[in-house]
Amino acid sequence: MAYNFQVTFDAAHPHVLADWWADALGWQVEPSDEDFIRSMIAQGFASDDDTTTHHGVLVWKEGAAIRHPDAAAGPGGRLLFQLVPEGKTVKNRVHLDVRVGADDVEAELQRLTNAGATFLHRGQQGPHSWVTITDPEGNELCLT
């Protein structure tokens, strides 16, 4: 049996990071269901402390997710950003390779660094090359 999965990033500011990645990938932030959140609070399954407001919308404080805009067409394609109390202290052991196409790497590097990414280094193996950057919270990704 084959399984679907999501990739989860620890985050200090999950909603802000979800916005950044949605913009970086051309994906969509999953909408908040404010009525559902309020009903969970009213029924005692959650409290106001479990929520926050992001861009004027009531959201769960603990996390935010993004999806590929055509997620209905197939499996996968979900990233979750989850609140954690500690900051990132070491290099990621897993990262995403974002395939933007060789002709677009430089433009995407400029766009993402303007949006808060940090350039780390360039790499090459044979004819294949990439640029390694970090998102605003220090998570590595490669542009290929």
Image (tube, grey):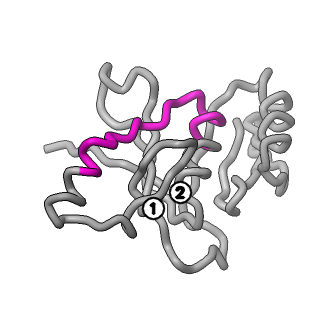
Q: Residue at x 30, y 25 (%)?
A: 74
- Residue 101: x percent and y percent? 70, 24
- Which of 34/109 is in front? 34
In this picture, which residue range is highlighted in magenta?
Answer: 21-38
In which image quadrant can residue 33 be found?
top left
Q: CA distance from mark 1 to mark 2?
A: 6 Å
Left or right placement of residue 44 versus residue 136 in this view: left
Q: Residues within 10 Å of mark 2 (few under 14, many from 20)?
A: many
Residue 125 numbered tag? none
- Which quarter of the picture shows residue 94? bottom right
Q: Name the residue nearer the viewer: 65 or 144.
A: 65
Residue 4 spot, x, y in % from top left:
27, 43
Q: Position of residue 115 (x, y in %)?
A: 78, 42
The residue located at (40%, 21%) in the rendering is 70
User: SS at mark 2?
Assistant: helix
Q: Which residue is mark 1?
A: 82
Question: Is the C-beta separation of discs 1 and 2 under 8 Å?
Answer: yes
Q: Which residue is mark 2?
A: 14
Q: What residue is rendered at 48% in x and 66% in y? A: 83
54 versus 50 height, above or below = above
Relative to residue 2, is residue 70 drawn left or right? right
Q: Residue furthest front?
A: 42
Identify whether 46 is placed above or below 6: below
What residue type is disc 2 on? Pro
Tell me, yes or no, whether the highlighted magenta stretch contains residue 92. Answer: no
Q: Bin the neighbour count of mark 1 within 10 Å (Cα to Cα): few under 14, some 14-19, many 20 and up.
A: many
Q: Residue 48's x, y, as percent?
A: 36, 65
Q: Amino acid at mark 1?
A: Gln
The image quadrant where one finds the N terminus is top left
Q: Is residue 89 above or below residue 144?
A: below
| Front residue of this view, candidates 15 and 129 | 15
| Label whose residue precedes the other's in the sequence (1 or 2) | 2
